[in-house]
Image (cartoon, rainbow, N blue to C red):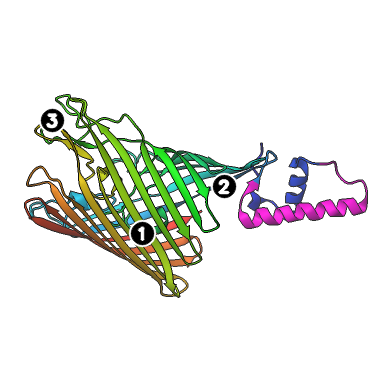
């Protein structure tokens, strides 16, 4: 299998390469047949040049893409990480100090393939970024690659790691900050999903997904396993999700639900987690788009970004209890000119079960953004970010950040 870098060859050479590589009938024996074959090859070259991809003799189209993004971060109050971690705001002025940070960890690379089969196209998607572990600012600023997506789709089926079916990915506000607003479902995980098109505008999808558990033991210790060997809960069944999506010409509405099962390792007690998300987006005026998401449930903390991230706990009586939570986000974007877009996104997350006076009770965020595209594959971003965290005893603190970025897409 050969890969031809298209930009290195002239049009006649490309035609000759395709003629030598293509699987098909022998070269024409008459001038008329030869002229027809040349026209067909030139049409293929036109497609390759316009799409920037190459169809191999096996019938598989391979696409390679991604972007390089560099962020320049100035925290006015305290350092909250390469992605604005509002849940990490300290409820104290101690240690507050402005800080500068530059990093390129959001840069990513993807490889996609499409292979035509007798029963429809078979597609794969493999994607990495650099929000993995490691990193040393003193020496090389290196970070480990992190798997984002690794899945295949065929005939309505999706198998592998990708966005949860419970996520409102179609209605995510765009932010310079990697995390984005609080209170919105955000998780990629291994799953098997089937999507059924009811009509041209309506589809229903169901999935079984990885059920990783996050909770507390009777002592209030966070995490699935503890030093005492007591676990707040274990996974014995996959998470089940069901979603219905309506997509119109200028609007989209999605209703999704998730059902989870938790088992206590110290007793026969079990608990059921569940959650519902209603989301949508609409372009109601020229150049403007609205985004919204509302989430409510018991035992879904792990699904909500920038939140408490706890699903359940073992109470003093040894019973397994789920944690109630609510999340809401709203966003609006407006094209100011063909090259400049402004956006605002706000988010809120609240948990109704706390264990100690210093536990997080609620958090809120606001992102005010500008995006400028000096050319098609380059975006310059600037964003003011505000976050507030309140704990169970009523005390609160806030933090703000100025973040700019330069992104080169390929």
Any part of residue 80 in sight: no
User: Is 281 a magenta residue?
Assistant: no
Give the side of residue 335 with respect to residue 394, left or right.
right
Is tag 2's residue or tag 1's residue first in the polypeptide sequence?
Answer: 2
Disc 2 element: strand
Please give the label number shown on residue 63: 2
Is tag 3's residue or tag 2's residue first in the polypeptide sequence?
Answer: 2
Marks 1 and 3: which is nearer the front? 3
Q: CA distance from mark 1 to mark 3?
A: 49 Å
User: Residue at horizontal 31%, vertical 35%?
Assistant: 212
Any part of residue 338 in sight: yes
Give the side of residue 359 with respect to residue 329, left or right.
left
Disc 3 element: loop
- The x and y percentages for residue 154 are 56, 41
User: Residue at horizontal 28%, vertical 48%?
Assistant: 304
Marks 3 and 2: which is nearer the front? 3
Q: Which residue is mark 1?
A: 405
- The x and y percentages for residue 390 are 13, 55
Circle 2 Cα neighbour tier, 10 Å, few/some/many (<14 / 14–19 / ≥20): some
User: Is 44 a magenta residue?
Assistant: yes
Is tag 1's residue or tag 3's residue first in the polypeptide sequence?
Answer: 3
Task: Give the magenta part as a residue range.
Answer: 25-54
Q: CA distance from mark 2 to mark 1?
A: 26 Å
Q: Main secondary structure of the magenta part?
A: helix
Quadrant that contains the N terminus: top right
Please give the label number shown on residue 281: none
Q: CA distance from mark 3 to mark 2?
A: 53 Å
User: Residue at horizontal 93%, vertical 49%?
Assistant: 30
* Quadrant position of residue 253: bottom left
């Amino acid at each position: 299998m050969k890969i031809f870098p298209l930009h290195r060859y002239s049009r006649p050479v490309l035609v000759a390469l395709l003629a030598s590589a293509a699987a098909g009938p022998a070269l024409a024996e008459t001038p008329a047949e030869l002229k027809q074959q040349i026209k067909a090859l030139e049409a293929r070259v036109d497609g390759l040049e316009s799409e920037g991809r190459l169809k191999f003799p096996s019938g598989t189209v391979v696409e390679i893409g991604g972007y390089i993004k560099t962020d320049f971060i100035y925290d006015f109050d305290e350092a909250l990480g390469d992605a604005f971690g509002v849940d990490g705001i300290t409820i104290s002025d101690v240690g507050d100090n402005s800080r500068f940070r530059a990093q390129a960890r959001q840069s990513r690379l993807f490889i996609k393939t499409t292979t035509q089969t007798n029963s429809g196209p078979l597609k794969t998607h493999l994607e990495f970024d650099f929000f993995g572990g490691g990193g040393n600012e003193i020496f090389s600023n290196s970070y480990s690659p992190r798997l984002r997506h690794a899945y295949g789709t065929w005939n309505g089926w999706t198998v592998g790691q990708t966005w949860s079916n419970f996520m409102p990915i179609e209605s995510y506000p765009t932010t310079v900050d990697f995390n984005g607003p609080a209170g919105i479902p955000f998780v990629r995980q291994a799953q098997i999903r089937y999507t059924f098109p009811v009509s041209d505008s309506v589809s229903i999808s169901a999935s079984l997904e990885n059920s990783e558990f996050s909770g507390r033991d009777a002592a209030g210790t966070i995490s699935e396993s503890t030093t005492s060997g007591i676990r707040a809960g274990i996974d014995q069944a996959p998470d089940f999700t069901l979603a219905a999506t309506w997509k119109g010409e200028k609007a989209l509405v999605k209703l999704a639900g998730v059902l989870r099962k938790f088992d206590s390792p110290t007793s026969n007690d079990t608990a059921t987690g569940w959650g519902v998300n209603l989301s949508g987006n609409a372009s109601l005026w020229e150049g403007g788009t609205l985004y919204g998401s509302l989430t409510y449930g018991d035992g879904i903390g792990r699904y909500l970004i920038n939140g408490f991230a706890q699903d359940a706990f073992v109470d003093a009586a040894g019973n397994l209890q789920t944690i109630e939570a609510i999340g809401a986000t709203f966003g609006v974007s407006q094209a100011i000119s063909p090259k400049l877009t402004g956006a605002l996104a706000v988010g809120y997350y609240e948990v109704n079960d706390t264990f100690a006076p210093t536990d997080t009770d609620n958090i809120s965020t606001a992102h005010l953004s500008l995006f400028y595209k000096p050319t098609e594959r380059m975006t310059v971003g600037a964003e003011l970010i505000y976050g507030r965290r309140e704990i169970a005893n009523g005390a609160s603190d806030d933090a703000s950040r100025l973040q700019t970025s330069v992104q080169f897409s390929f």
